[in-house]
Image: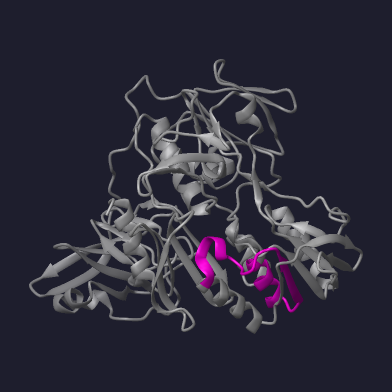
Amino acid sequence: MSESPKNPTGPDFTQGVAYAELAAAGKLSGHVGDTEVLLVLSGEKIFAVGAHCTHYHAPLVDGLAVDGSLRCPWHHAVFDLSTGEALSAPAFGSLTCWEVERRGDEIAVRKRQAPIERVRAIAPSGSSPKNIVIVGGGAAGFAAAERLRREGYDGEIVMVSDDAVAPVDRPNLSKDYLAGSAPGDWLPLDVESFHIERDVKLQLGARAIGLDPRGKEVTLANGARLSYDRLLLATGAEPVRLSIRGADLPHVHTLRSLADCQAIIDRLPTARRAVVLGASFIGLEVAASLRARGLEVHVAAPEKRPLERVLGPEIGDFVRSLHEKQGVVFHLEDVATAIDEGRVRLRSGGELEADLVVCGVGVRPRLELAEAAGLTLDRVVVVDAFLETSAPGVFAAGDIARWPDPHSGRNIRVEHWNVAERQGQTVALNMLGAREAFRAAPFFWSQHYDVVINYVGHAEAWDEIEIEGDISARDCLLRYKENGRVLAVASIFRDIESLRAEIEMERGL
């Protein structure tokens, strides 16, 4: 996506603006010719950068500038104001930087800034790994490969993926792409400076079946053996599949990969009624997307309220009401016992007509390689603060990793896309000798029609939910506390507060 629309708004920075105008707001959106540019006052320095996030085109004027960086209001990407570099996922493309001219009380922007080189994280000559293997073609694997190349690593990178396509933007599969409002060219994760099939030896449809940490070798199902100096295990998770009768019928689907999403889309022309099994984030996002496609949608789930376990009863009730206003019918405290052609049978004795069934009842970490290799496990792979496993030179990230979270003081595992990408970036640095602890606060977003819920931190349990604002008015901030300490923050249309909460967690406040 481009950084600027065709008809930019705001002041023409080539004509100059008053410093007082920028000082009053902290950020000022304008343009240079046809390009939208953002002026940012950070401390005593003035920066001029592209006005939109390179991830989903969010207006950065609504973001937060702190410590020489600029944070995206929507999905919390972080950019260096001096260089424009994307420091933290989910953005990978850099912002364009512009030269700032100041004469007295006037500021002008007229030409682009020449690229500024920064010190890279490459290890001393001779100690850098000669070859790196990444097992997994998802968020963590892609982010690690991209960061390795960005840091100047020129050794061999082999990515082994049992998927049929190169890494894609998976959150879109249950949201805009499934709803029909996002084109397919939004899905690939490649960025201008990095193309996975050009910069990495990508082996698609390849399954790793063995890992020998001592011999530093990975065995593939086709018999091939890959040696490595450093290895990233990013095998992710797979959907839990129901064991009830009819779960393998052609009109029953799970949603994890692009192929899964396309299979659902292919059935839509002949589908009129859909049943979603599970009121998880994925299940409810699928429900919203199918309603956008005009299908009648029913949701069956065992819990009393959707999302209550993660977000509490108040948000759970709000989300249910939000979906019901869009025509979704809930069957809560109930589960499917059988699926037949054209209908789903429920434990309560009811039956739901269904041309399409989507199962969103959770995922299971893919641990076969880690278990066979003898890595230390605690339900998933245990890693240290640097995301290294019990086997030297073998790192793990994403859905399969449990790491020491500095904010909660606990070893945690989360299934968030942003976390997987940011862990992949940290692994890349540590493979090159940086020894950088993973300190990012977990973050995810969930979209339900025109409402986006942001969540920072990690609260497996809490004894208090402090609510600020009005949930029903879609203007709120919820703090999940344990013994008076904030573990997580959820928000609706409180982007700046969400960013501030993230910064406070990162700083240990």
Q: Is residue 225 above or below residue 1?
A: above
Q: Is residue 240 left or right of residue 190?
A: right
Q: Residue at x 54, y 65 (%)?
A: 446
For the C terminus, give its image quadrant.
bottom left
The quarter holding residue 48 reads: bottom left
Does the magenta portion include 257?
Answer: no
Instruction: From the viewer's side, name the closer residue of 340 and 117.
Output: 340
Q: Is residue 461 above or below residue 350?
A: above
Q: Residue at x 63, y 77 (%)?
A: 323
Q: Is residue 392 left or right of residue 187?
A: left
Q: Is residue 190 left or right of residue 481?
A: right
Q: Residue at x 46, y 78 (%)?
A: 471
- Picture coordinates of residue 390, whole percent (x, y): 48, 26
Q: Residue furthest top?
A: 215
Instruction: From the viewer's side, name the closer residue of 291 and 17.
Output: 291
Q: Is residue 22 left or right of residue 399?
A: left
Instruction: From the viewer's side, name the closer residue of 487 and 505.
Output: 487
Instruction: From the viewer's side, name the closer residue of 241 and 51.
Output: 241
- Picture coordinates of residue 102, whole percent (x, y): 13, 68
Q: Which residues are magenta?
A: 284-313
Q: Is residue 262 above or below residue 36?
A: above
Total marks drawn?
0
Q: Is residue 375 above or below residue 22?
A: above
Does the magenta portion include 288?
Answer: yes
